Image (cartoon, rainbow, N blue to C red):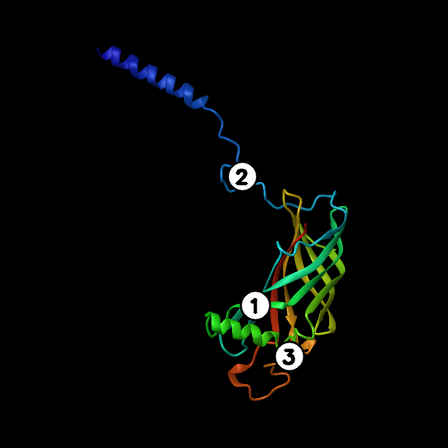
Amino acid sequence: MKSLITLIVFVIVVVGGYFLLNKPAAAPVTEETGDASMNTEETAVNTSVDGKKEIDSNSSTVKWTGSKTIIKDYFDTGTLSIKSGNAVFSKGVLTDGEVVFDMTTIATTSTGKGSDADTTSKMAGHLKSDAFFDVAKYPEAKFVITSAAKESGNTYLVTGDLTIKGKTSPTSFPIEVTQTSEGKVMLSGMATIDRTVYDVRFGSSKFFQDLGDNVINDEFTLEFQAVTK
């Protein structure tokens, strides 16, 4: 009896080990399986990308953030639409390009005072008024690349002329340029802009005294992701 039990255990171990060592390989990771490695993964821009690529306004996003200088953690945030634009490449290397912003689309998503519809709507209206960006007179802003220096990996230092309210000034900021498996190129980054350079003076301590805690930071940020068609 003892010998029979020993034999059965031996057979189970041998057979089990065979199937364990020869089990089928795991299915390849695909978009259909819902795994993390989807075929929309971004990579370096292929050298076959050449010439002018138009920006897809519907797929591109711009988020702005402003703040008050004295009040800690006081932020206003919102969005802005890209009207048109392009990026120019030479064998996969960014060389030129421009983006036109539709200033009439300035919207507010949250403020330091609250995020209710009435508060955000009033903020958006204020930003569109002649106290800030005067969108009735200046419905567009524009950034034109004058140089694009490739740094490490997919990062570039982009320099260009930014025009807001009819005033143009040079500015530089880093961007990441990648390509999706669908062939679309993505230009992503964040630019810090001094609004007073473009005659947006409301709430600036450079031009007004005794503002108390109503001083608005002269600098605001634009976080963007421009996607080609």
In the image, residue 130 lies at what x, y percent?
A: 64, 79
Q: Residue furthest front?
A: 136
Q: Which residue is mark 1?
A: 107
Instruction: Tell how many labels.
Output: 3
Query: Image point 69% across, 68% down: which residue?
Result: 140
Q: Residue furthest bottom?
A: 210
CA gap, disc 2 and disc 3 = 49 Å
The one nearer the camera, 37 or 154, is: 37
Asked if the residue under mark 3 is in contact with the one under mark 1, i.e. CB atoms within 8 Å, the reply is: no
Numbered mark located on residue 130 in the image: 3
* Residue 67 seen in render: no
Label 3 Cα neighbours within 10 Å, binned few <14 / some 14-19 / many ≥20: some
Residue 195 screen position, x and y as percent: 65, 74
Q: Residue at x 30, y 12 (%)?
A: 7
Local SS, label 3:
loop
Q: CA distance from mark 1 to mark 2?
A: 34 Å
